[in-house]
Image (tube, rainbow, N blue to C red):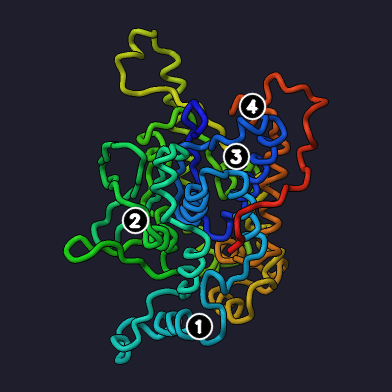
């Protein structure tokens, strides 16, 4: 059984940056264990789980184990703490040559050359290994059971259709819910599969598009963060009364932060800027929109507010307190040599002092343990710093004497979930 009121968890995209989300969730799970009695902890704190891109994979992994939230978070953390790039994409020399090197060669020589029709590289990197990881990490066959046991109200993942140009939210739920449709975006009720997760996490140009559907209904999809004008909308449509939103980048940069001009920006610098626009900007804008609606509704008399379809939405936003580009710059040497060589060709430096703005691009592709562990630790620290806000949001810990609370960072008990 999930907790009441119905809380929606919104996990944004960001490639390897999604490790930060796992740190936030781990700290919340520990805080929950600190302040709640064992019987209360049997309930899933997030009845609605919504994810995009790498956040969709984290969301689906949690949803599939909604009946054991704390254990699921810990297993998810162990996967991210032990990551290697080759678990996500081909990082060996042959794999990089077949995808990225070939793609860059075509780009440099021109699109119209004699061999183009034979080669036709699809992306910078080949993410074939990710499908095997999903088979072990996300047992989607458990979702019907989670719905039947009322451990989960709804799961939604988003993708962007290259075929139709629409932003599509695929969702499944334990009871009938009406799909919705807005300008350039729509919702489709279907059983969530690994194909939907591959589509949602297919970063444009970096990973190949994924095909969903058969026959006339088949379409090619890419990363769900593209054309995502309303990231919070799916959770609200699915019935969430409040939202925990975990970002994969800082919502607002300090006004006085300006980098020194160091010549023309590299291709990697431009790509990193474009990815920040895809992954970060829409979420920040949608949060501001929600806050404006809340303020407007608060000004209306009760009788007028009851006549509007809008409703105030309580939310808690947790995002990195540090720039993840800077964190990535410290770990550039962790990337496999073939991948570093490939990225160097588009302007990513070899070290923090020679990053030349390209660390932003690397921050999305650095599925390596030293980097992901630091992001997990940052997520835990950020929750610890905002402990009182988290407790107030969930209304946890009321009436529990402080002397009876175990320490927040106590060791985890032995888990009964198998680590993939």
- Pointer 1 residue: 95
Residue 160 badge: 2
Q: Are marks 4 and 2 in contact (CB under 8 Å)?
A: no
Measured Cα–Cα span from mark 3 to mark 4: 17 Å
The CA distance from mark 1 to mark 4 is 49 Å
Contact check, label 3 and label 2, Cβ < 8 Å: no
Res 142 seen here = yes
Q: Which residue is denoted by mark 4 in the rendering?
A: 396
Front tag of 1 and 4 = 4
Residue 156's disc number: none
What crowding class fits label 4: few (fewer than 14 Cα within 10 Å), some (14-19), or many (20 or more)?
A: some
Q: Give yes or no for contact between labels 3 and 4 (Cβ–Cβ under 8 Å).
A: no
State how far apart marks 3 and 2 are (Cα): 25 Å
Q: Secondary structure at mark 2?
A: strand
The secondary structure type at the circle numbered 1 is helix
Q: Quadrant of residue 309?
A: top left
């Amino acid at each position: 059984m999930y907790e009441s009121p119905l809380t929606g968890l919104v996990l944004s995209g960001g490639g390897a940056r999604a490790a930060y989300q796992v740190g936030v969730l781990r700290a919340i799970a520990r805080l929950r264990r600190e302040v709640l009695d064992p019987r209360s902890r049997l309930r899933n704190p997030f009845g609605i789980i919504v994810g995009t891109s790498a956040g969709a994979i984290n969301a689906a992994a949690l949803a599939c184990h909604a009946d054991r939230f704390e254990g699921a978070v810990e297993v998810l953390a162990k996967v991210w703490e032990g990551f290697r790039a080759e678990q996500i994409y081909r990082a060996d020399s042959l794999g990089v040559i077949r995808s990225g090197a070939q793609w860059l060669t075509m780009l440099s020589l021109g699109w119209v050359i004699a061999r183009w029709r034979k080669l036709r590289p699809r992306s910078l990197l080949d993410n074939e290994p990710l499908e095997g990881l999903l088979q072990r990490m996300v047992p989607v066959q458990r979702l019907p059971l989670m719905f039947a046991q009322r451990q989960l109200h709804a799961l939604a993942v988003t993708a962007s259709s290259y075929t139709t140009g629409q932003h599509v939210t695929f969702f499944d739920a334990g009871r009938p819910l009406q799909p919705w449709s807005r300008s350039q975006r729509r919702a489709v009720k279907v059983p969530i599969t690994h194909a939907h997760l591959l589509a949602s996490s297919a970063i444009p140009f970096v990973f190949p598009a994924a095909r969903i559907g058969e026959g006339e209904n088949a379409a090619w999809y890419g990363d769900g963060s593209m054309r995502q004008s309303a990231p919070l909308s799916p959770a609200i449509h699915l019935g969430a009364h409040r939202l925990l939103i975990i970002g994969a980048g800082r919502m607002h940069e300090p006004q006085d932060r300006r980098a020194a001009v160091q010549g023309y920006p590299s291709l990697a610098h431009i790509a990193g800027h474009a990815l920040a626009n895809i992954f970060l900007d829409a979420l920040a804008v949608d949060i501001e929109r929600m806050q404006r609606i809340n303020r407007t509704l608060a000004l209306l008399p009760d009788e007028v507010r009851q006549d509007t379809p809008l409703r105030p939405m309580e939310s808690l936003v947790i995002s990195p307190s540090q720039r993840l580009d800077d964190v990535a710059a410290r770990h550039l040497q962790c990337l496999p040599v073939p991948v570093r060589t490939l990225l160097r060709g588009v302007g990513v430096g070899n070290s923090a002092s020679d990053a030349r703005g390209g660390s932003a691009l690397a921050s999305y592709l650095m599925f390596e343990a030293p980097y992901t562990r630091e992001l997990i630790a940052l997520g835990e620290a950020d929750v610890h710093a905002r402990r009182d806000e988290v407790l107030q949001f969930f209304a946890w810990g009321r009436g529990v004497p402080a002397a009876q609370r175990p320490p927040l960072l106590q060791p985890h008990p032995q888990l009964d979930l198998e680590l993939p």
